[in-house]
Every structure is written in structure tokens, then in C-alpha cells.
Amino acid sequence: MSMTERLSLYLVMGSQNCYLDPIEVLQKAIQGGVTCFQYREKGSGAKVGSERIELGLHLKRVCHDYGIPFIVNDDVNLALELKADGVHIGQQDGLVQEVRSMIGSEKLLGVSAHNVKEAEKAIKEGADYIGVGPMFHTSTKKDTEQVRGPIVIREIREVFPDFPVVGIGGISKRNAYDVVSSGANGVAVISAISQAENTSKAAQELKQEVEHGRLGIEIG
Ligand code: TZP
Ligand code: MG
């Protein structure tokens, strides 16, 4: 599967985001169509120390059982310790080139970008994909930048027609279409899947909107 296909439905999650067992949530989410997973054990209620490592190893095993990449948020050392498939960093989490030299050329490196300038820099410095957000209002992450919406995806697409881009922040089945029809390769979500009543159904419905959004680009 290509990087752009991998970004179709990207689940970001830690145990603090789940009402149910995160292992089961991940399994059901992948069964419903999730194509990539990011372990983001962070914030109030998050596991620390050996529990954070244990859960990470378990979630990685689930990803690999189903053949999807296991990416670690923020923490390069944790990514290396867990032998993750990659790491995702924000603008505050270190220099892209430094992280690249720590993880090597084989592992995936995702970088958050909020505008064309940050996207340009991340791409030039060796990111494999960029995450752009917040697309919409979200209460899952407190320290987000201002919401500018899917227009940012359009702006980035004008400069980088083919680079792998995923939208994040406040995305649900009601607005995923707008993100993808604006040019994103897919959507990254936390609460729309991790807090859904029916995990696999939520993933299925989002995936369907991503597919509609792709048709929306071709037609529009
Ligand atoms: N980065 C930008 S917004 C966000 C992250 C991690 C939170 C996304 O959570 P949700 O529940 O999908 O809005
Ligand atoms: Mg970060």
C-alpha cells in the first residue's frame, strides 16, 4: 500500500481516549477500515513508565497482525524502544532532520504542519507525510493552533500536488468529505473512533466518507 493510501483512515489514540479496552478498540477499528495507527499515550490519565511501554507493545502487535503501520507520537526514544514503524512529531518536538537521523531512512516520519510554510519546511527536511490541523474545533487536544479549516489543505495542495497529507482535528463522518475533497489523502481522528458507541461501524462510515471525498475531487 502506498503512503497516500496508508493515510486514508488514520487512528490516533492512547488509553486516555478510550472508554473501553484500547486493544479491543484498535482491533475493531482496523476491522472497520483503519489503515494506520498512531500511539499517543499523552495527557491526563495517560499511562507512564513500564505500563506505557507494555500497552505500546500490545498495540503494535495488533497493528502488525492486521498489517498496518504502528507509529509513535512525539517520543523518538519510545518509538525506537518499541521498534515502531515510525514516529510523528509536532512543531515543538524536535528538528525534522535530527529525528530522521535518529530513526534512519526506513522508518516513517510524520510531521504536523499548520500552514504552507511549515509544510514546505517539513517536506524539504525529510518528512514522509504531513498532518494538517486542526481542521475543525476539537476538545481532544487543548493546545491547538487556530482553526482555519480545509482551506489549508487546498493551499498546501497547490504547492505540493502529490505529497502525502492527512487532515486532523474535529473530524467526524459529517465533515470528513470536506477534508478529502479539499485534497487530503485521508483523515486522522481520535474521538470519532475511540469514543464511538460502535467502533467498527464508526470506522466504516468514516472510510466511506473518505472514498466519497476522493470522488468529489475527481468530479469537482
Ligand atoms: N492534533 C491536532 S488536533 C488533534 C491532534 C492530536 C486532536 C484530534 O482529536 P479529535 O478527537 O479527532 O478532534
Ligand atoms: Mg507533539
Image: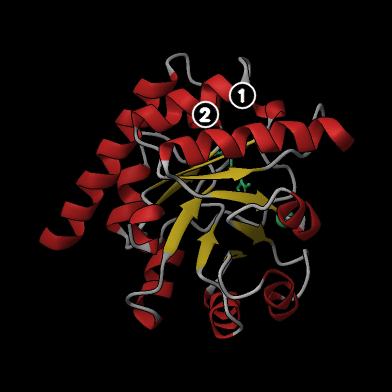
In the shown orientation, is residue 140 left or right of residue 136? Answer: right
Q: Which residue is mark 1?
A: 22
Residue at the farthest left position: 219
Quarter assignment of residue 47: top right
- Quarter in which the N terminus is drawn: bottom left
Q: Residue at x 68, y 42 (%)?
A: 40
Image spot of residue 123 (x, y percent): 53, 79
Cβ at disc 2 under 8 Å from ligand 1: no
Q: Residue at x 72, y 72 (%)?
A: 99
Camera-side residue of 152 and 187: 187
Q: Give the secondary structure at mark 1.
A: helix
**Can residue 220 be seen here?**
no
In the shown orientation, is residue 30 left or right of residue 41? Answer: left
Image spot of residue 90 (x, y percent): 69, 62
Q: Is there a contact, CB below 8 Å, between mark 1 and mark 2?
A: yes
Q: Quadrant of ligand 1?
A: top right
Residue at the farthest right position: 49
Amino acid type shown at disc 2: Leu
Image mark for residue 26: 2
Residue at the farthest bottom position: 124
Cβ at disc 1 under 8 Å from ligand 1: no
Reply above or below: 105 against 44: below
Quarter assignment of residue 2: bottom left
Image spot of residue 98 (x, y percent): 75, 78
